[in-house]
Each structure stands twice: as structure tokens, then as C-alpha cells.
Image (tube, helix red, strand yellow):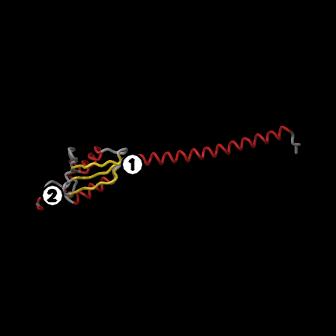
Amino acid sequence: MKPVGPEQIQDTHEHNYISLCVGNLKKYKRMKKVVVVILLIAIGAAAEAQVEKVEIKTSAVCEMCKEIIERDLAFEKGVKSAELDVDTKILTVEYNAKKTTADKIRTRITKVGYHADDKKRDPKAYSKLPDCCKDGGHDEDQ
Ligand SMILES: [Cu+2]
């Protein structure tokens, strides 16, 4: 055991000072983390608020089409809701304008097999639709 000299006492003081600083730094870092998290939530909320609505005229003919289109759009990025009115063939879509565009949604509809406004349906997708959803599939109803 060495006798405690003045240098060693100073050493201890310095050590205490350093640990105090480290403690403050940790507190500061934690605070910074909290601020960053709050900012991220605020930015997320702002992005969330960019909801827009578009009405798209489709070539849907029946309830089956409604189901096919609505179910498909549920998986499209940025789409909040999609509802088709079978009588008017108009699909109303609510979407996050920061994540997608009305044009991307129209393209998605064509890839399911339906016209979307002036965009023509994908013929391959159309050929895979149930017979009732094709042109003239409901002629006997009229
Ligand atoms: Cu149909």
C-alpha cells in the first residue's frame, strides 16, 4: 500500500470531474435521442396528413370487379381506401400524396385488367378475369 500523496488526491478529483462530465454527456445524449424521436413522429404525422382523393372511371361491370379492384388496391403502397361504385363505374381512392400518385394508381388498375380513365387495361390481365367481368359478361342482365 502506497501512502496517498497530493498528486493522487488531485487524480481522484479529476476522475470525479470526468465521471461528472460523462454523466452529463449521457443525459445530453438521451435528451438528444428524445428530441430526435419527437421530430420523427412530427415528420411522420406531417407525411400522414398529405391525403388526397381521386375519382377514377373504370371499366368495372359487377360486384366481382368491385371486389377484385378494391382488394388489389389495398396492397398498393400509399393507398388509404378504395371504393368502387358499380353503377357509375367510378372508383374513389384516398391516397397519401407523398407515397404515390393518381397516375400510379391508374396504372395499377390497368394491370388488374380494367381501363382507368384514359389508360387502357393490360390485355393479359384482362384475359385472366372471370367471364362475368369481361366485355358482354353481363349482357343477359340488360
Ligand atoms: Cu366483374
Split into quadrants, the picture shows ligand 1 in the one at bottom left
Q: Amino acid at mark 2?
A: Gly
Q: Earlier in the sequence, mark 1 or mark 2?
A: 1
Query: Residue 80: x and y, percent?
Result: 34, 52
Query: In the figure, is residue 38 to the left or right of 89?
Result: right
| Residue marked by disc 2 | 137
Determine the image quadrant of residue 71: bottom left
- The x and y percentages for residue 42 are 47, 47
Q: Position of residue 139 (x, y in %)?
A: 11, 58
Quadrant (top left, top right, bottom left, bottom right) of the C terminus = bottom left
Judge by depth and name the residue closer to the eye, 128 or 102.
Answer: 102
Could you say which quadrant of the image residue 97 lies in?
A: top left
Q: Image point 43% across, 48% down: which residue? A: 45
Q: Within 8 Å: ligand 1 and the Cβ of disc 2? A: yes
8 relative to 78, above or below: above
Q: Is residue 83 above or below residue 102?
A: below
The residue at 26%/58% (across/down) is 67
Residue type at mark 1: give it: Ala
Q: Dot 2 lies on which element?
A: loop
Question: Where does label 1 land, which residue?
Answer: 49
In the foreground, 79 or 139: 79
